[in-house]
Image (cartoon, rainbow, N blue to C red):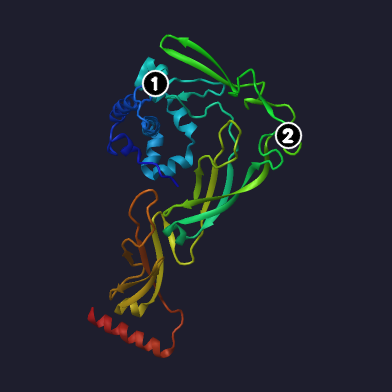
Amino acid sequence: MSTKRDYYEVLGLQKNASQDEIKAQYRKLALKFHPDRNKSPDAAEYFKEVSEAYAVLSDTEKRKIYDNYGHAGVDGKYSTEDIFQGSKVNFEDIFGSSFESIFENVFGRGGGFRFGGFDFGFGRERGADLVYDTEITLEDVLKGKQEEIELPSEIQCGDCKGTGATPGTSMRTCSVCNGHGQVRTSRSSGFSTFVTVQPCNTCRGQGKIIERPCSKCRGTGKQKGTRHFSFEIPSGIESGEYRIRGEGESMSNGMSGDLIVRIKVKQHDKFKRDGADLFYDENISMVDATLGKKLIVPTLEGTEKIDVEAGSQPNTIIKLKGKGLPHQGSRGRGDQYVRLVVNIPKKIDKHQRKLLEELQDSLNHEE
């Protein structure tokens, strides 16, 4: 569910890079693309991209998850706040005592900070997460699926058109924060600058004051409603929780929550799954196992021909290479394994018994 570039590609490193190599390369790129040093229009986005890559790869646990599951694994377990807050010590390790001045850390009431001049939301009010449950089939896992859903949402009030003020009236700019919605105080210490940012208590962070609130929405400018949302369930996905950033409950002058998608892959009536591999049981008679036979077995994409060799034993496994599921977060596909289940008849008639006894005698003589 992500279009992010590979973190190793972002930093220009191989997947087996050491922590010292990751640290050195990040320091080089961070100083190169920091907006205070680099005035190109793309510098800010590059800086954020390399900083996020370093925040993940410099943390042993996050790096392990990323190496195994890619962006889906990291995004499914950590929020942006978790990634940067948890890796703060790694940034300090690189830049030492100049960490604050280089990155303009802003410590707010919630322990938040601005990172490289960019607000990653720590200490800001955040909307609630929304949860969506869905079941998908193995065929969906093979091909991926586009999911279309309706989410509860706040929509613009029809009476006040979202202003929050009674129709025909207006709002005035807050004189305390001058319309910014925040009150900032700065304190300098050596090379570091600490900036505390707090919501304005007078206007409650809105920047404007409503003299006569709308009676329908009570000054919020919003009403309860629904919104249409679509997202792609990627091929190869497994049952679990996956997080889509910013698609949860919205929050005025704050951060939107996330949409947590809980996916359950249904059991298939023919195939069992183990990661990207599929397993299928094919019932054959003891005669076919003895003499050999050509069979047609099902796959998720149709059918496939297999050769049962003469003298095949019960539980013989035949591999269909590349007929499994896509690997989650990486290229290639797993395999399908066909297990031969040899059926032994529970009842036989006299003629059949006689034939088997003759066969047994013949085999005994050969020994």
Foreground pick, 217 / 19: 217
Separation of residues labelled 2 and 1 (CA atoms): 53 Å
Amino acid under disc 2: Gly
Residue 259 occupies quadrant: top right
Quarter assignment of residue 36: top left
- Can you give x and y, in whole percent of width and height, for residue 163 in the image? 67, 34
Residue neighbourhood size for the residue with mark 1, other residues' Cα within 10 Å, grouped as few (<14), some (14–19), many (≥20): few
Residue in front for this viewpoint, 154 or 132: 154
Residue 318: percent from left, percent from top: 32, 66
Q: Viewed as shown, does residue 140 lie left or right of 31?
A: right
| Picture coordinates of residue 363, whole percent (x, y) | 27, 81
Task: Please say if 162 is above or below 131.
Answer: above
Residue drawn at x 73%, y 26% as measured from the top left = 211
**106 lies above or below 52:** above
146 up-or-down from 296: above or below: above
Left or right of 123, for residue 14: left
| Kind of residue at badge 1 | Glu
Q: Nearer the viewer, residue 246 or 181?
A: 181
Q: Which residue position holds label 1?
A: 92
Determine whether label 2 and label 1 are within 8 Å by CB. Answer: no
Horizontally, residue 104 falls left or right of residue 197, namely left
Q: Earlier in the sequence, mark 2 or mark 1?
A: 1
> Which of pointers 2 and 1 indicates the residue nearer the eye?
2
Which quadrant of the view contains residue 286? bottom left
Residue that label 2 marks: 168
| Label annotation for residue 22 | none
Indicate the position of residue 150 as horizontal and vertical percent values: 60, 51
| Residue furthest to the top | 190
Quadrant of image for the C terminus: bottom left
